[in-house]
């Protein structure tokens, strides 16, 4: 295998690794953001002693 083929293969594997890392990072950030929004909504409703608990959760369930 020539140097050119080796370097091309290395670049391809690095690109694939970067893509996977970006996907995992974006998924984790989305999960953290969603969880924090739902947690804040729950805590606000609990503090305000609102009868309709988890308004955002009910809204999301109605969409799906």
Image (cartoon, grey):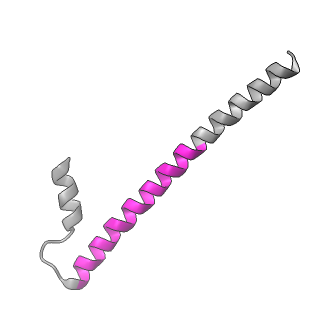
Main secondary structure found in the magenta portion: helix
Residue placed most toward the observer, 18 or 57 = 18
Image coords of residue 23 (percent x, y): 52, 44
Against 49, residue 42 (above or below) is above
Q: Quadrant of residue 55?
A: bottom left
Image coords of residue 54 (percent x, y): 21, 68
Q: Is residue 19 left or right of residue 30?
A: right
Q: Is residue 17 left or right of residue 35?
A: right
Picture residue at 47% right of the left edge, 49% below the top: 27
Image coords of residue 37 (percent x, y): 34, 67
Magenta stretch: give its range: 21-47
Q: Residue furthest left?
A: 51
**How many marks do you count on the picture?**
0
Q: Quadrant of residue 13?
A: top right
Picture residue at 44% right of the left edge, 61% below the top: 32
Image quadrant in which the N terminus is located: top right
Image coords of residue 18 (percent x, y): 63, 41
Against 52, residue 19 (above or below) is above
Q: Indicate yes or no whether the magenta region holds residue 12.
A: no
Q: Residue furthest top?
A: 1
Against 26, residue 34 (above or below) is below
Q: Indicate yes or no whether the magenta region holds residue 40.
A: yes
Q: Is residue 6 left or right of residue 14?
A: right
Picture residue at 41% right of the left edge, 62% below the top: 33
């Amino acid at each position: 295998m020539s140097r050119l083929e080796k370097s091309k293969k290395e670049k391809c594997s690095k690109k694939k690794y970067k893509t996977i890392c970006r996907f995992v990072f974006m998924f984790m950030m989305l999960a953290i953001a969603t969880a924090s929004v739902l947690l804040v909504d729950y805590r606000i409703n609990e503090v305000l002693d609102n009868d309709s608990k988890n308004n955002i959760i009910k809204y999301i369930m109605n969409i799906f």
